Amino acid sequence: MNLLVIGGGGREHAIIRSLKKNPQVQTIYALPGNGGIAKDATCYPISATDIDGIVAFAKEHTIDYAVVAPDDPLVLGCVDKLNEIGIPCFGPKANAAIIEGSKAFSKDLMKKYAIPTASYEIFTELDKALAYLETAEIPTVIKADGLALGKGVIIAQTREEAIEAVTDMMANAKFGKSGSTVVIEEFLTGPEVSVLAFTDGKTVKPMVSSMDHKRAGDNDTGLNTGGMGTVAPNPYYTADIAEQCMQEIFLPTINAMNAEGRTFKGCLYFGLMLTPKGPKVIEYNCRFGDPETQVVLPLLESDLLTVMQATTNGTLAETEVKFADKHACCVVTASAGYPESYQKGFEITFTPEAEAHTYVAGAKLEGSKLLTSGGRVTGTTAVADTLADAVKEAYRIADGVQFENAYRRSDIGRKALQA
Ligand code: AMP
Ligand code: GLY
């Protein structure tokens, strides 16, 4: 079989390494992939958002199955377009990807179908949003409606900060068009859990839970990033909570999307907060998380391609989705300065052990040299019988990934170990 994977980050590298375990897989094309992925797949420099370019590429090559991994091509209808030329895909169509593409849509969906989430108001006019903020409870949370690369969320600790955030988004277009509609919501507290789930639109099979570390600095300080490391499973996510989430959140969400005529197939990501009043949805993503995938897939014992195809064919109920009873930790190595400005172009070297355990996110090939080209450069994953060993091993192995100006958080997994 020939596979096509859309995307070019650490998540896509992890997906490709898992897909390669299936002996039927001959060739994997990655668009655009990256310099590290090029060791595991055939990369072509076609951007993940160039839907016409992707379709043209797919027409020229024999593709049996495609995996659309990032949010933007999903929201832009990449799956719809590939389906039109007869290529089955992993991932939701555009009308279902809106569950991530518009926060206003997802909040209204949860309200309509009584799925627990933070209470909220949606604003399209600046003066109404500002009037609401005069009496809103502080802290409060301000979210740009559309995709903003995880940066469109401001936790305002003071009324002044809230006013500034809303004004930046609505009047100063700080997040472009995605901030012309703003969601203002209740500030929730409690441990955060990421749950990625396979679904074919009828059956939901959650993957092992995980914990992201979103802030740039140790002890959850500094700016929000795409994620500086992960552990799985998440110790706060007990079997009882998992069952409660299945009944109150996962199944109601799938049913709600069906009722809206927006059947969701693929990986639905539930960003949950375990509040004193029970689990609530912080956000939905229409795709695998990054770097959650880098700890979840190494624990998957079932064949990834078989499970993905089952979500497409509607046969997930009969398909086993089994995870190892082990622990995983992924430590991201980033360019110092990320998520703000940073330097690129430094050569990356690996020990053989590090290379085997590392997913490459932001790197490009120049001749035979691998050079840094992004904020998050690599993610190094270790699997062990205990969380403590997985964390220790991930850090030990990540030391074998070297480049100038490399930066890692030093406390990935600490909170989970203290849970
Ligand atoms: P999101 O992009 O929606 O996942 O938000 C980014 C991060 O902001 C989340 O991972 C949470 O840590 C935090 N956050 C979002 N919404 C809320 C909320 N209602 N209450 C508290 N924290 C939140
Ligand atoms: N790690 C969070 C995300 O993928 O959105």
Image: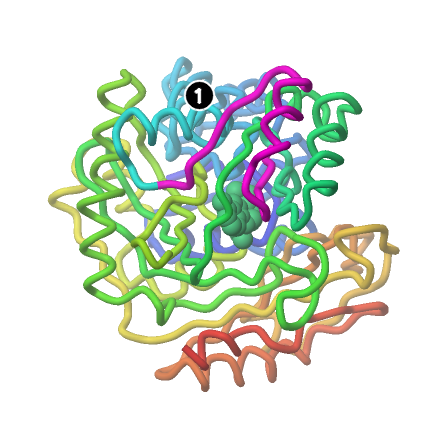
Q: Is residue 11 visible?
A: no
In this view, 207 is above or below 408: above
Q: Quarter-wise, where is residue 40 in the image? A: bottom right
The percent position of residue 204, horizontal first and vertical second, equals: 22, 43
Is 19 included in the stretch rendered in magenta?
no
Q: Quarter-wise, where is residue 164 in the image? A: top right
Q: Quarter-wise, where is residue 301 in the image? A: bottom left
Colour mapping used in the image = rainbow
The percent position of residue 238, horizontal first and vertical second, equals: 26, 67
Query: Could you tell me which residue is drawn at 85 percent across and 69 percent down?
Result: 404
The percent position of residue 25, horizontal first and vertical second, equals: 38, 47
In this view, 381 is above or below 302: below
Few, some or many residues within 10 Å of mark 1 (<14, 14–19, 20+): many
The answer to whether residue 268 is left or right of residue 373 is left
* Quadrant where the C terminus is found in the figure: bottom left
The answer to whether residue 315 is left or right of residue 62 is left
Q: Can residue 188 be seen in this view?
A: yes
The percent position of residue 152, horizontal first and vertical second, equals: 64, 37
Q: Give the residue type at disc 1.
A: Ala
* Quadrant where the N terminus is found in the figure: top left
Tell me where the magenta segment starts and ends, as one range: 117-143
Query: Could you tell me which residue is drawn at 27 percent across and 46 percent down?
Result: 307
Query: Could you tell me which residue is drawn at 75 percent across and 71 percent down?
Result: 349
Which residue position is annotated with label 1?
A: 94
